[in-house]
Amino acid sequence: MTDTKYVLAIDQGTTSSRAIIFDHAGRIVAVGQKEHEQIFPRAGWVEHNTAEIWDNVREVVAQALAKAQINKNDLAAVGITNQRETTLVWDRKTGEPVYNAIVWQDTRTQKIVEELGGEQGADRYKEIVGLPLATYFSGPKVKWILDNVEGARERAEAGDLVMGNMDTWVLWNLTGGAHGGVHATDVTNASRTMLMNIDTLDWNEEICADMGIPVAMLPAIRPSACVFGHGRKNGLLVDPPISGILGDQQAATFGQACFEAGQAKNTYGTGCFMLMNTGEEIVPSKNGLLTTLCYKIGDAKPVYALEGSIAVAGSLVQWLRDNLGIIADSKDIEALAASVEDNGGAYFVPAFSGLFAPHWRPDARGALVGLTRYVNKGHIARAAEEATAFQTREVLDAMEADSGVKLTELKVDGGMTANETLMQFQADQLGVDVVRPVVAETTALGAAYAAGIAVGFWNGEQDVIDNWAEDKRWGPEMDEAERDRLYRNWKKAVTKTFDWVDDDVVE
């Protein structure tokens, strides 16, 4: 295969839509990107306008093709990756959403989650789906829409409405929408709904019934690498096959070439997500992690993973920028944090939507503790950076306990890996090397690889391994006693966020 063909990946993220074109060596040729609005109707609620997102997807695809000076004829395949649990319900005949997409961070379904758990609690479905009952996942979001949008339940039961995570929305529109669009998802996204049997990879009708979700609403479940369909006739992507779909964190794991059991990566984006490949074995977590699909290539057996999900990482930096005005640009956080020698005794626990792994405390809310008159904005910036590293250590500890595997290094990717101060502190806290690849856009790259493998552009996982290259490595430098002291203080700070949401708190 020559370098004259390329693969396009559409990365439909939490804050922006991106289209990235890759060559056969896995190098970036061109990028189109556009942010979309974050809608906060109430405290704890987060929504996206999906019409805006679909407009942006088309625009960034055009940008990328124009920058690369290529057209659809130069594309071997198209892949899609996405914010996973963000959920949409729309009319299959018109393509009109009945409500905004409810974003993965949204916590409005807490009462639904508690009711579903009943006496059995949060682990009611965990053995079947690999997930605890939490506001994070798609199923309860669909139930909320059907329960709260006038006429939605009746329309769903009549067969007029369908649902999907954002991968399904993008695929459906790319392939024609109301005029013959493909209504499908892949195993990784399906595994984030709380509705899929994790062993047999099909929808669980009993859980759907418990949540009041008609099975007919759900997309077809397919492998991560297979031909889903082709672009609509009046779009820019008419001919190339859309042949790869992976949820963003699974895509990054794929792009990082974590194909062996025990290999792990951490992605630093809006949130922070660590995945460890567990091979063909389904490993139930006893330490607050999720059991999820890692990927499935065509007819090959599915590969599973353990996942630690952290809700707030990069979005804390955005909050310091947008809500407090401490910095003018996200990249300014590193210089501000480096202006002080340490955190000044301040610890920032960003439990803005509760705590995800390994605590799973929806009653928690954010806290900045240890404040004295000595603390300045440099210390707060440093505490914000360190929060990401501390949360990652909590997840890694849980992952090692569940898997029995001691990690020797951690592969990292995502926007925050450009922050070298943070990466050094991360290595210090973990006590192992932190390694960043040359291509840090591993999420889009993973979707591109899956799409390209499905059509023979790449010869399976070995090509991914061969293309992967190390950019920079950080080794631990901190004294072990100091490392442990900081971590003890962090864990003490975390306890201060518990039990905040009660009857006196109005959200």
Image (spheres, rainbow, N blue to C red):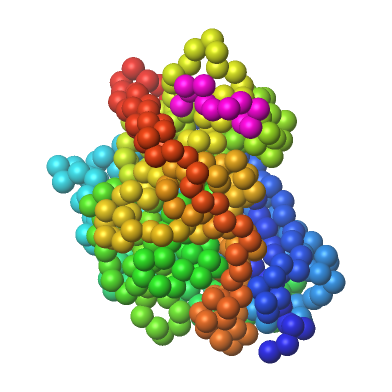
Question: Which residue is located at x 66 percent, y 46 percent?
Answer: 36
Question: Which residue is located at x 67 percent, y 25 percent?
Answer: 325
Question: Which residue is located at x 55 percent, y 17 percent?
Answer: 375
Question: Which residue is located at x 50 percent, y 36 percent?
Answer: 386
- The residue closer to the viewer here, 388 or 243, is 388
Q: Position of residue 234 (x, y in %)?
A: 74, 72
Q: Quadrant of residue 176?
A: bottom right
The quarter of the picture where the N terminus appears is: bottom right
Q: Is residue 60 above or below residue 122?
A: below
Segment colored magenta: 337-347
Residue 344 counted in the magenta span? yes
Q: Is residue 325 above or below residue 66?
A: above
Q: Is residue 174 left or right of residue 499?
A: right
Q: Position of residue 47 (x, y in %)?
A: 54, 42
Q: Is residue 167 above or below residue 233?
A: above
Q: Position of residue 106 (x, y in %)?
A: 46, 40
- The residue closer to the viewer here, 67 or 387, is 387
Q: Is residue 39 visible?
A: no
The quarter of the picture where the C terminus appears is: top left
The image shows a total of numbered marks equal to: 0
Q: Position of residue 179 (x, y in %)?
A: 61, 71
